[in-house]
Amino acid sequence: MSDDTGDIQALISQIARLPGLGPRSARRIVLQLIRKRSGQMAQLASLMSQVAENARECVICGNITEQETCSICRDDLRATGEICVVTDVADLWALERGRAFRGRYHVLGGSLSALDEVGPEELRIPDLVRRIPEEHVTEVILALAATVEGQTTAHYIAEALEGSGVTVTGLAQGVPIGGELDYLDDGTITAALRARRRI
Amino acid sequence: MSDDTGDIQALISQIARLPGLGPRSARRIVLQLIRKRSGQMAQLASLMSQVAENARECVICGNITEQETCSICRDDLRATGEICVVTDVADLWALERGRAFRGRYHVLGGSLSALDEVGPEELRIPDLVRRIPEEHVTEVILALAATVEGQTTAHYIAEALEGSGVTVTGLAQGVPIGGELDYLDDGTITAALRARRRI
Ligand SMILES: [Zn+2]
Ligand SMILES: [Zn+2]
């Protein structure tokens, strides 16, 4: 607005670019943060810089962690021989909230897309194939979105795992056509996982 | 989600409490910030801590500034003898975007409310009364919301200014009943300001 609020305006533009936000909501957020005398903004800033410094991808599964490997990969009780493949960490979190799955994960970080030049390497599919013998995996559950991209990716993975002796299953019912996993309620996602079927 | 992501989960809860956001949008924001390799999160964090340190209210008008007084109060060209009274800094920004008003502002920071124990002192109304002779003010424009609270506050201020010799006007047309200023488009707010009338 004016020359002495350059940082404030820069902060608003940065926040406005975050997913789901725009200039108006960014202005309201920044004003609320400035107004709160409790130091909410300073607290948020320091938490954010800590996370920026420490958060990284688990070298095994791609989950977000503050260590070399995530707590799920480090937990021996979760070496059940099952790996659940998800598109995104948000999907992993959704499944963890449902508490239905006690195995380990493999986070692709996207879907196959010739257009965006996203190939198997980018999605860490070779890493997944390597994990099968290393972790004595018996079942790979493809918990991917019921979209064209999700299903294309699922088929590619199912083919890549052929001959590895692993059973490949997919979420069966409950995932609506065109539905993204992260938008389902926890009950639906749990039911879909329980009713999973061979692909 | 798991013990080694305590900071990440804390960051998500803090972001989820911001206006207009919730747990799902907070998760998406944090994941996007972590994913971006460009250091977007570190940049946002440092900008935020700078603003937290430096942003404060202008001692004259209540606008947000990084100095003792805001750039509008320091600008002699804006000593037009007009003061525009707004509920909130967001409203001041909306008026500035419209570029129709070239005088100064007085930010109340709220509306009169017996229920919430917000009285004239909290809204800095005595400060406004003192500004009239000090700044040779000839017109006070009450750019308050067309809500019961906004209009109650407008009437209180009009009475407090009686006998000060100042002309008190209000936004005339264009502000819909029940409408908050910050939600209007810039053109509407500009038209309402131009058509202001005596109260
Ligand atoms: Zn892991
Ligand atoms: Zn000022």
Image (cartoon, coloured by chain):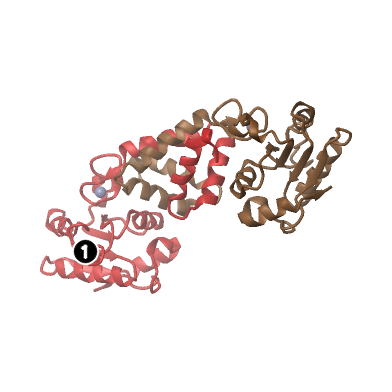
Chain colours: A red, B brown
Count every numbered label the image shows and give the total.
1
Q: Residue furthest front?
A: B77
Residue A154 lies in quadrant: bottom left
In the picture of the structure, the residue carrying the numbered disc 1 is: A139
* Amino acid identity at mark 1: Glu
B102 lies left or right of B152:
left
Q: Residue furthest left?
A: A163
- Name the residue located 45 percent from the left edge and 62 percent from the top edge: A185
Q: Nearer the viewer, residue B158 or A146?
A: B158
Find residue A29 and report its horizontal and vertical position in percent.
Answer: 54, 44
B16 lies left or right of B1:
right
Whether label 1 lies within 8 Å of ligand 1 gets the answer no
Q: How crowded is mark 1: few (under 14 residues within 10 Å), some or many (20 or more)?
A: some
Find residue B186 and report its horizontal and vertical position in percent.
Answer: 61, 54
Residue B141 lies in quadrant: top right
- Name the residue located 43 percent from the left edge and 64 percent from the top edge: A184
Res A89 seen here? yes
